[in-house]
């Protein structure tokens, strides 16, 4: 069944790629390692320096790519017919339901994260000798990650297929604060035309992971190589998260940590079972930023206030304090405004579970 | 493995209480240790904290005691012999403050080795059991100024 889906995905993407290929993402050239005579590689941002190439792309109906630079990653993946919604958080949000999501969001002043704009790496390759002739050769490469895979795609804007594309893909999993290589794969494809060059099925299985690629393109004896080895975590395009929420003892850490929505010490000190309390799977670095972590004065005060509010059975005030604490916590990865936005789905679900756990309805 | 020295009431590694924010940022710019620092209103360091993840690269020592690789029950006894912890703190079991040393230690869960016999523990996945057992050790160590 899964392979059948994969085959369908391949066929659908192949058919759609030539129609939707350009104009879906910000253009950004990945690291160009070598450039030999015969082929030139540029990014979309450099296209105005190559008016003759731009003219060919325009003539062949791909000119809309020059104007479209700010589409969400979901929109991009949908255009390529790649899956966007296999997150566990999507499932839990379905359990909570739209009505409760809206109610809790309004009640606690939750802010949804801004739509993600991913600068997927792209390369335009052309044969300068062929530009201006009837057989102008231009190819377009794009690298995409989805919740289920990492995909290398190519569009042949010209006439000749690329002789060969070779690649090595690596997946790194986060454990604590360290990313370690979890798996890798190499591939070779010859006579490459429009479509998926390689789709590496890699579902998320850790709280966070990221992909590295090294791609070598060969055409008529010339070779170009690309990689994203120089990216830092803050600039990582291909980093994925697998956040989740649930009762503490049933929630797997998956290389991250389980953050009690209300701290375990406050719960236990007030007679509650902290093992069944709502918790969020988050990265270790994020956990350190939460308001109740550690023994700083502010963290100890925070847990003391939790204890007081629990003792007074002021559950709504308690939940509001938790939300405000996450709003005040910065995202160490620098990708979200704060942890409340980063963990929006999980915060909603934790609030939903908190109502059940404490037996109250937010008013 | 490299050693990271913890001096209660004074310093952790290169970061000292009383240092300015600028000094600390300069000193720790390329440091692999993740220091969590609080400042007073004059931007002078008044609190330094490190997490147990530091033990992956350093032995975090005070007076030849490995603070992150010694079980809470043993460590508290050792430290209490040096200077008593605050027995009136509302979070004893989780938080141990040694006011005369200028040292505090914290863990998010108060557990003992007996939990392995408890039903809720047995029902958890192996990964979660291992995750839980890390709470036999402290998760953070902090130093602060001793009140005179």
Image (spheres, rainbow, N blue to C red):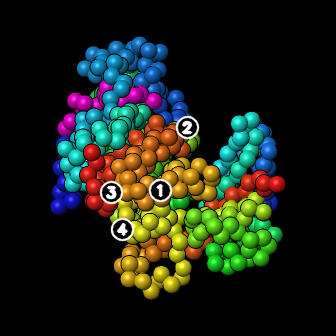
The secondary element bearing badge 1 is classed as helix
Q: Alpha-carbon distance for marks 3 and 1?
A: 17 Å
Which residue is painted at 51% across and 68% down in the image?
A: B109
Q: Which residue is mark 2?
A: A33
Label 3 or label 4, whichever comes before in sequence order: 4
Task: Name the residue nearer the viewer: B85 or A85.
Answer: B85
Per the rendered image, the range of residues in magenta is A14-28
Q: Considering only vertical position in the picture, is B90 above or below A140?
A: below
| Discs 4 and 2 share one subunit | yes
Label 2 or label 3, whichever comes before in sequence order: 2
Q: Which residue is mark 1?
A: A308
Residue A84, x across and y down, in percent: 27, 45
The secondary element bearing badge 2 is classed as strand
Q: Considering only vertical position in the picture, is A209 above or below B91?
A: above
Classify residue B30 as left or right of residue B91: right
In the rendered structure, the residue with mark 1 lies on which chain? A
Q: Alpha-carbon distance for marks 4 and 1?
A: 20 Å
Q: Which residue is mark 4?
A: A276
Task: Name the residue nearer the viewer: A105 or A318.
Answer: A318
The secondary element bearing badge 4 is classed as helix
In the rendered structure, the residue with mark 2 lies on which chain? A
């Amino acid at each position: 069944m899964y392979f059948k889906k994969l085959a369908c995905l391949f066929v659908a993407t192949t058919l759609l790629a030539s129609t939707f290929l350009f104009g879906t993402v910000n253009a950004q050239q990945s690291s160009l390692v070598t450039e030999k005579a015969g082929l030139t590689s540029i990014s979309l941002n450099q296209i105005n320096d190559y008016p003759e190439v731009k003219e060919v792309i325009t003539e062949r109906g791909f000119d809309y790519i020059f104007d479209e630079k700010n589409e969400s990653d979901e929109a991009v993946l949908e255009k390529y017919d790649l899956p966007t919604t296999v997150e566990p958080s999507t499932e839990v949000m379905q359990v909570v339901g739209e009505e409760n999501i809206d109610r809790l969001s309004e009640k606690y002043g939750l802010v949804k994260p801004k739509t993600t704009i991913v600068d997927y790496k792209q390369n335009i390759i052309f044969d300068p000798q062929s530009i201006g002739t009837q057989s102008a050769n231009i190819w377009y490469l794009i690298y995409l990650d989805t919740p289920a895979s990492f995909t290398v795609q190519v569009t042949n804007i010209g006439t000749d297929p690329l002789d060969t594309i070779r690649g090595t893909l690596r997946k790194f999993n986060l454990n604590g604060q360290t990313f370690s290589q979890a798996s890798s794969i190499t591939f070779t494809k010859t006579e490459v035309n429009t479509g998926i060059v390689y789709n590496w099925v890699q579902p998320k299985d850790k709280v966070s992971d990221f992909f590295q690629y090294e791609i070598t393109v060969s055409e008529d004896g010339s070779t170009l190589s690309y990689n994203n080895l120089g990216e830092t975590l803050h600039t990582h395009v291909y980093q994925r998260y697998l956040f989740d929420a649930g009762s503490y003892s049933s929630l797997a850490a998956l290389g991250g940590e389980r953050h009690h929505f209300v701290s375990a010490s406050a719960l236990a000190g007030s007679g509650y079972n902290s093992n069944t309390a709502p918790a969020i799977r988050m990265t270790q670095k994020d956990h350190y930023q939460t308001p109740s972590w550690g023994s700083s004065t502010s963290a100890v005060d925070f847990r003391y206030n939790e204890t007081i509010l629990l003792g007074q059975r002021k559950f709504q005030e308690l939940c509001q304090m938790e939300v405000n604490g996450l709003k005040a916590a910065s995202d160490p990865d620098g990708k979200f405004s704060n942890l409340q936005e980063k963990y929006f789905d999980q915060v909603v679900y934790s609030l939903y579970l908190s109502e059940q756990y404490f037996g109250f309805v937010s008013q | 493995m490299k050693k990271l020295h913890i001096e209660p009431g004074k310093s952790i590694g290169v970061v000292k209480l009383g240092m300015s924010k600028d000094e600390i940022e300069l000193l720790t710019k390329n440091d692999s240790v993740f220091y969590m620092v609080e400042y007073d209103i004059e931007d002078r360091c008044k609190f330094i904290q490190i997490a147990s993840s530091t033990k992956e690269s350093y032995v975090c020592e005070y007076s030849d005691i490995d603070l992150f690789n010694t079980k809470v029950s043993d460590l508290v006894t050792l430290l209490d012999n040096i200077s008593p912890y605050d027995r009136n703190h509302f979070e004893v079991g989780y938080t141990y403050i040694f006011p005369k040393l200028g040292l505090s230690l914290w863990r998010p869960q108060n557990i003992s080795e007996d939990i392995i016999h408890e039903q809720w523990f047995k029902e958890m996945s192996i990964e979660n059991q291992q995750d839980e057992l890390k709470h036999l050790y402290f998760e953070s160590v902090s130093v602060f100024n001793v009140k005179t």
